[in-house]
Image (cartoon, rainbow, N blue to C red):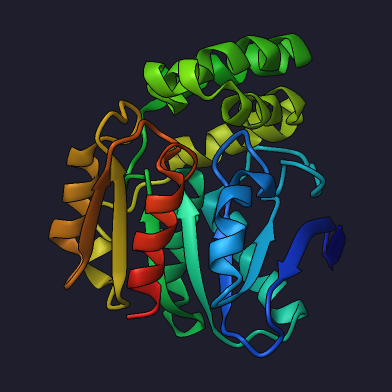
Amino acid sequence: MTAVQLADGELNYLLEGPAQAPVLVLSNSLGTDLHMWDAQMAAFTEHFRVLRYDTRGHGQSLVTEGPYSIEQNGRDVLALLDALNIEQAFFCGLSMGGLIGQWLAINAPQRLQRVVLCNTAAKIGNPDVWNPRIETVLRDGAAAMLALRDGSIARWFTPAFAAAQPSQVEPIVGMLAQTSPQGYAANCAAVRDADFREQLGSITLPVLVVCGSEDAVTTPADGRFMVDRIRGAQMLELHAAHLSNVEAGALFSSRVLDFLLA
């Protein structure tokens, strides 16, 4: 593992793939780390130098005082690109990572080439959902993270996939139990406060929106909302719940690569 030094701590990252290939940034969901993309790496590194990182508050990256904002997380990505002398990159983010992708596409389009927004929305949930979760996690700490881990299985995966593929499900939900409660709560606030509904129309980059047909968190209707407002955006709906890159694995990888390489 390697890290870049930000003003307030270290951001953990992995950079893999051919040195001369274009760079693809992968941004993790709330409660996971850069290993949520493990299933994509063999396919993606055939064509890209893949830069995946642990969002602030997650994995081995810095945990600072919350609350965080999606702008703060987006600026961390720009600092990472700057530190590695990467002028432009492709970007693929899921859920919270998709919010970061929206912020970057709106505020730093010159740094991106094509953007994949997976299992995300212009606005995810509302304070009635997020505030009790933040309070519980800050109060109960690691015990709350363990409790969230069990609830997340039903949100992140369809029942059939969870039952049939425990070897794929367990490592992913295990990431949630290992996430810093302080970092998780701070990022819950970032997701709670993000709202790009009025700004989506300013995005001019090529965008692919990936949805899970069984995703109750960020629904296909949320995906269509984004596609309707981003000029020229394409939509891909896969049979999956919230973590489509894990549940739809190989199909996710091939269809996203089709878009990125178009």
**38 lies above or below 158:** below
Q: Quadrant of residue 167?
A: top right
| Left or right: 41 in relation to 205 | right
Q: Nearer the viewer, residue 151 or 170?
A: 170
Q: Where's residue 111, x and y in %?
A: 51, 81
Q: Quadrant of the C terminus?
A: bottom left
Q: Where's residue 70, x and y in %?
A: 53, 51
Q: Is residue 165 visible?
A: yes
Residue drawn where x is 85% and y is 57% of the image: 10
**195 lies above or below 46:** above
**90 lies above or below 143:** below
Residue sitting at the far left: 228
Q: Where's residue 220, x and y in %?
A: 21, 40
Q: Nearer the viewer, residue 166 or 198?
A: 166
Residue drawn where x is 47% and y is 24% of the image: 130
Q: Quadrant of the N terminus?
A: bottom right
| Left or right: 198 in relation to 87 | left
**168 lies above or below 223:** above
Residue drawn where x is 37% and y is 43% of the image: 119
| Left or right: 191 in relation to 1 | left
Residue sitting at the far front: 164
Residue drawn where x is 77% and y is 78% of the image: 83
